[in-house]
Image (spheres, rainbow, N blue to C red):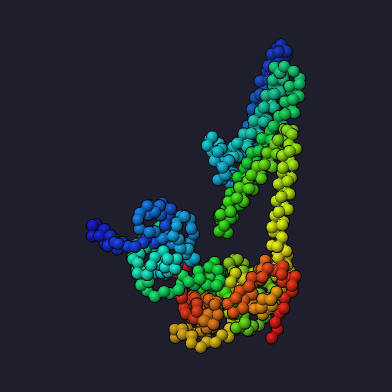
Amino acid sequence: MQLGREWFQGLTSAEQNFVLAVLLVGVGLALGGVTAWLVRGVLVAFDVDEAAEGTAFERTARGIGTSTVGLLSQLCALFVFVVAALYALEILQFLPTQQLVVAASWLLPRLFVALLVLVVGVLVGDKAEIVIGDWLRSIKLPEATIIPRLVKYSILYVAALIALSQLQVATGALLVLLAAYAFGVVFLGGLALKDLLSSAAAGIYLLLTEPYSIGDEVEIDGARGVVQEVDVFATTVENDGEEYVIPNRKVLREGAMRVRS
Amino acid sequence: MSALGDLVTDIVAEVDSVFLFSPSRSLFEAFAGTDTPVVVVAPEADVDAERFVELPLEFNDLTERVRFGVEGGLDNEFVEEGDQIACAAKLFADDIDAVTRVRAGDYDQSGVYDLFVNSRAEPAVIRNVLEVAIELGKKGQKGKRVGALFVVGDAGKVMNKSRPLSYNPFEKSHVHVGDPIVNVMLKEFSRLDGAFVISDSGKIVSAYRYLEPSAEGVDIPKGLGARHMAAGAITRDSNAVAVVLSESDGLVRAFSAGEIVLELDPEEY
């Protein structure tokens, strides 16, 4: 220890800087490795590797000889290493001006976050597409391929927007587009689902209180018969081979007549 | 060896179509190129076959499985009455190890395909009820053999043709068969007398029902008891199907339109 210090003090200041820079790069490499290891551990603990299985992103990552978890941890390690390297360059006074250092220290974290958001966005988008597609297939409705794709691109759009705004690119116009899109989805969706929603609200009341149940004879909105089924959206009434499916909102609006005999 | 080869060739000679029961993807693709029409019979449509019959229950008995497949093929018009059909299915191993030949419509239609597909209730509901009955028949309730009667579908009419024996334990509850907890409940309640009534969508409407259909003209084999008679009568009197677990011989029988369409031994599942 003593020996090392004496040797260090014996060097010229330029040589001292060089030794420090080399040390810093070494520490940066080591820290980067530790970061990669930690991030990988955390990601695996949260089952990210299993969640990423089968996504297009994972396939691409596999194609270049790594995996989603590997890519993410390597990204973090790279960030740590680049910061260390930047400090080393500064010590060696390789950087032409102080301004560049300021600019780099402003840009680097933002670039890092932007990249991370993009990767996570692509990953979540892929995963959402797969999950929703599977769900649609499980309810035997694989034809509606537009929905998973729409969800995927919406997530990608939002991720890209976050990434761009991290880099302080002017995203005003894109934001307006997003707002218009969200408004469209909520408003038109609400308009389209209006009947379903009001039926479901009425259906929950009917299921909770059971003013009539299966087997009762009722008359709802001119349809008279025996109740065959009550679910959240509709009541099924049957009469001599005629089956009426009555939306539950009608039951609440028009009222139901129950035949007591 | 050639004699054996000739035997197999004889079995599959000049068949009009091939029925593959739960084939692997590679096997199906090997058949897809040939001229003979191929029909896939499997629990799940995972090989993208153009002609597909869904098997609601893994019938352990090969005869039942073939019967179901052929009736399904006839119903979907994949085959015509009198067509020669080669069936390849698994009998002992985990993949296809048996080949047999059958003529469509040779035996009288048992209606086992209609039971699942053309009943009022959804096929999944009937399958779930059958599974509960099979499990109950296998284990009994607390080691004791029990009987049970499930009436599935057309619940409104069934409720009007029956009366409560006591308070309905499923009143104001909204539970469906197929849910593991509900299946346990059903087994618990099976010691109650009377029938379970289950709606088209699988909702358990009532337990403890005394069925009072008109039993006129119901013809069930002699030796079966009042529970089977009630099952036969209620299915004749309404569009429901009934699943009965016999207390005396432990078999599960399904009734439709007053007739036994399916008989299963729970011990085989």
Residue A55: quadrant of the picture: top right
Q: Position of residue B178 (x, y in %)?
A: 58, 67
Q: Which image quadrant: the N terminus of chain A?
A: top right
- The front one of B220 and B238 is B238
Q: Position of residue A20 (x, y in %)?
A: 69, 19
Residue B84: quadrant of the picture: bottom left
Q: Position of residue A18 (x, y in %)?
A: 68, 16
Above or below A37: residue A198: below
Q: Can residue B205 be seen from the camera position used here? A: no
- The front one of B2 and B268 is B2
Identified at 38% across, 59% down, the residue is B37
Identified at 66% across, 74% down, the residue is B170
Is residue A69 toward the left or the right of residue B19 in the image? Answer: right
Q: Which image quadrant: the C terminus of chain A?
A: bottom right
- The front one of B23 and B266 is B23
Identified at 69% across, 23% down, the residue is A86
Identified at 67% across, 22% down, the residue is A23
Residue, far front: A222
- The front one of B45 and B105 is B105
Q: Position of residue A11 (x, y in %)?
A: 70, 12
